[in-house]
């Protein structure tokens, strides 16, 4: 694949992603146009493809997704979280503790160098963890591999659970989609909100700022009735594809070969975290009046953008899912650096 011209690689990526996305859509798989491009990107990346998604396209895709999420958000989503704050806090602490424990195991018992295992085991956000890990002596390539492998596995598992939960309802939801609705000035205003929110979020250096900036600005406008946001299906599919390609093409052959020795330990770490979160999801259904799919998506260990895509295509309480995911993201970004430094320092002292 590396010998093929970049233009031809883009052509293969586009055609294969479209075909696989349509096949998955035909079988009513949630987030078909995220999973299809992501899977094609993984295969092409491992085959030596040299093309990469420019960061600006990834930010733009997240901004569009932020506007989609904003349509489901209002201040009312805080009430159930505040009312059940012990449960919410327990889920956040348990997730961080589980990731910290698996990171300690990876640092101590795997061949991963330095603090790589601790950073790679952090439950999101992937891009922020990769960026911060380089400042603490971790191998950025392996951290990126672990983070995006987790995103890939969590996304695939969430889509599978969504498909099982929706059953025949998925076919009805897919059939009801209108891909090219009539557009008016509100669509162009939505694009303005996406652009301004993205710049605002990145200027403030918010974690996942390209997603959270438009989400906050759009929610403020939409929930107050100032502006009704318009996110037609065709632009959402394009945004999903950009996100899928960005994640998929990160799985390059050199990184994979570098990680192959510790791949079983990485997989065990990720699966263990997913099982724990699945158990917490079941517990949430026993304590709160939410369905299993809502609880599963709310407790899944990232990434926020991928889970938001799946939630948008499923019959779930999207506000609850996004609120829980956002809280998990911020708690991870706040405490993962401290936890990773502690694990690395503690392991090093024991080794000496």
Image (cartoon, rainbow, N blue to C red):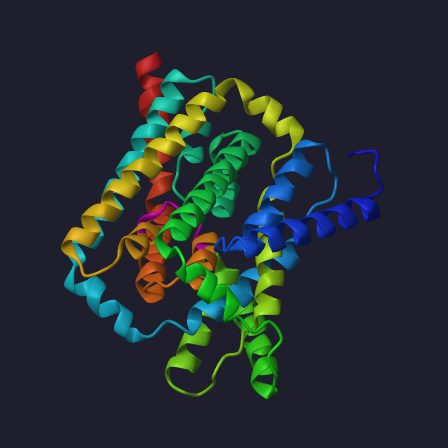
In magenta segment, residue 198: no
Q: Quadrant of residue 71?
A: bottom left
**Residue at horizontal 72%, vertical 33%?**
48
Q: Count every numbered label the image shows and give the total.
A: 0
| Depth check, front residue: 164 or 78 | 164
Please say whether residue 304 is visible from this viewpoint: yes
| Depth check, front residue: 96 or 175 | 175
Please say whether residue 207 is visible from this viewpoint: no
262 vs 5: above or below: above
The boundaries of the magenta stretch are 299-304
Expressed as whole percent of the image width and height from the top left, the position of residue 54 reads 68, 53
Expressed as whole percent of the image width and height from the top left, the position of residue 332 reads 35, 46
**Residue at horizontal 42%, vertical 51%?**
163
125 vs 273: above or below: below
**Residue at horizontal 53%, vertical 70%?**
177
Q: Quadrant of residue 322?
A: bottom left
| Depth check, front residue: 307 or 61 | 307
| 142 horizontally vs 52: left or right | left
Expressed as whole percent of the image width and height from the top left, the position of residue 32 reads 54, 54
| 104 horizontally vs 178: left or right | left
Q: Quadrant of residue 345?
A: top left
141 vs 193: above or below: above
């Amino acid at each position: 694949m590396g010998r093929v011209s970049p233009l031809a690689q883009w052509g293969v990526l586009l055609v294969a992603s479209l075909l696989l996305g349509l096949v998955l859509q035909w079988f009513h798989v949630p987030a078909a146009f995220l999973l299809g491009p992501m899977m094609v990107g993984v295969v092409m990346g491992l085959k030596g493809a040299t093309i990469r998604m420019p960061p600006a396209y990834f930010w733009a895709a997240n901004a569009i997704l932020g506007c989609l999420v904003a349509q489901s958000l209002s201040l009312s989503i805080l009430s159930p979280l505040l009312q059940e704050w012990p449960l919410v806090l327990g889920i956040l602490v348990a997730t961080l503790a589980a990731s910290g424990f698996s990171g300690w195991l990876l640092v101590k018992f795997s061949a991963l160098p330095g603090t790589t295992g601790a950073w790679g085991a952090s439950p999101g956000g992937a891009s922020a963890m990769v960026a911060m890990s380089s400042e603490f002596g971790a191998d950025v390539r392996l951290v990126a591999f672990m983070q995006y492998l987790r995103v890939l596995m969590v996304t695939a598992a969430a889509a599978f659970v969504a498909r099982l939960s929706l059953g025949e309802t998925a076919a009805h939801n897919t059939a009801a989609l209108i891909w090219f609705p009539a557009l008016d000035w509100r669509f162009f205003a939505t694009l303005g909100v996406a652009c301004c929110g993205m710049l605002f979020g990145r200027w403030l250096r918010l974690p996942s700022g390209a997603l959270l900036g438009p989400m906050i600005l759009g929610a403020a406008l939409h929930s107050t009735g100032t502006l009704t946001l318009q996110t037609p299906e065709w632009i959402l599919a394009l945004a999903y594809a950009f996100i899928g390609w960005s994640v998929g093409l990160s799985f390059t052959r050199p990184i994979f070969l570098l990680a192959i020795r510790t791949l079983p330990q990485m997989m065990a770490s990720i699966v263990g975290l997913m099982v724990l979160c699945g158990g917490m999801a079941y517990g949430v259904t026993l304590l709160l009046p939410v369905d299993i799919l809502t609880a599963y998506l709310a407790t899944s260990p990232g990434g926020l953008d991928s889970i938001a895509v799946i939630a948008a295509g499923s019959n779930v309480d999207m506000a609850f899912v996004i609120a829980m995911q956002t809280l998990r993201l911020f708690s991870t970004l706040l405490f993962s650096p401290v936890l990773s430094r502690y694990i690395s320092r503690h392991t090093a002292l024991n080794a000496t």
